Image: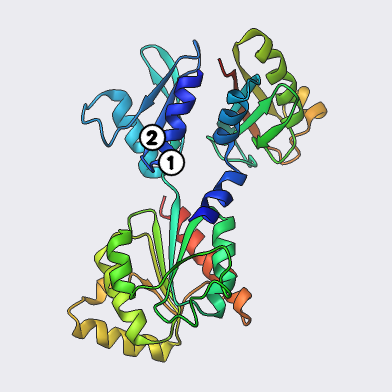
Amino acid sequence: MNFDHLKELQQARLSKRQVVLATNLINGSNQILYPFENKEETFLNSEAKIALNTDKAREIETEDGPVFLNIFNPPLRLFIIGAVHIAQKLAPMAAAAAYDVTVIDPRRSFGSEFRFPEVTLDGRWPDEALETLEPDRRTAIVTLTHDAKLDDPALKSALKSDVFYIGALGSKRTKAKRHDRLIEAGFTGDEISRIHGPIGLDIGAQSPAEIAISIMAELTATLRRKQ
Amino acid sequence: MTQNLDMAAKDDVLLFALEWREAGKQVALATVIQTWGSAPRPIGSQLAIDADGNMVGSVSGGCVEGAVIQEALSLMTTGDHKILEFGVSDDDAWEVGLACGGKIRIYVEALN
């Protein structure tokens, strides 16, 4: 690869574009592809799309020999609603797993920099924040407030998006009540079933950190197994 | 946001490759292009190496990086590229040891 290609690739990644580096394994030549921006239906472009969609780099056979398609998808994002104790543990764990984390909580005493040093905080109301953050297929949304006033607007926004994971903290009883409220708000049972609740894999978690681990485990399973 | 970029930068192989190159250093990139069995790092994983033998990222669980660096250093002098293969069925594997029992192919190239 030459320096200019490397610079372009890095620039594309910083602007969060879905980009593919195609390398001819015989002669070493490179090509940078933006298959979702370039509407040309070439063989390389459509193969590159498959690679990005499945989040898997792959080698393909072309007329010019074997070509390796390395994929650079934009970062995974996690939006945590509720700057609560579990969020303090979950945010750094998710960051270590390469998620861009934002903690959303309009309550100043919760969402303070003192409680969340080095974490992106958003003090807006959850539905308002989510509208500008534009959750997508590479995003997970987790509600942790236990408070319908804050959780519900976030869940409604989440259900209208194509995020890969929605999780809501709360017991089975809380879950049943939430289900009724969302039905009343016009969502179908199928739609509501996208919400993972009680949140997290059942590993007997007790402390905030353990619950954060169970949430990260469920998030990972959902992300990787869908492929 | 700053913090998140920093977090990403810790593992950011291409960013380091770019910075090393901009500092005038010779750089090589290694990329996992194929795996069989229980390979430690998925296809597409990368390792950047500079002329002093500094490395960022990984192409295995540490089993073959040493051998990859040797190849990378010699490719830097020629500006060439090469495909390396490691696996337990290989005699080489006893030396570089893919203890997991997997097999991997790695594409190594000098940055020109």
Q: Nearer the viewer, residue A2 or A215?
A: A2
Bin the neighbour count of mark 1 within 10 Å (Cα to Cα): few under 14, some 14-19, many 20 and up: few
In terms of sequence position, does the residue under pointer 2 or pointer 1 come before the other?
1
Residue furthest toward the right? B95
Q: Secondary structure at mark 2?
A: strand
Residue positioned 41% across, 54% down in the render: A226
Q: Provide residue A207's location: percent of width, then percent of height.
A: 63, 81
Which chain hosts label 1?
A
Question: What is the number of the mark on residue A193?
Answer: none
Q: Which residue is mark 2?
A: A19
Q: Which residue appears at 59% of the width and 30% of the height?
A: B19
Residue A112, how many percent across, how many down? 51, 75
The C terminus of chain B lies in which quarter of the figure?
Answer: top right
Disc 2 sits on a residue from what chain?
A: A
Mark 1 lies on residue: A14
Q: What separation in Å lies between label 2 and label 1 (alpha carbons)?
A: 11 Å
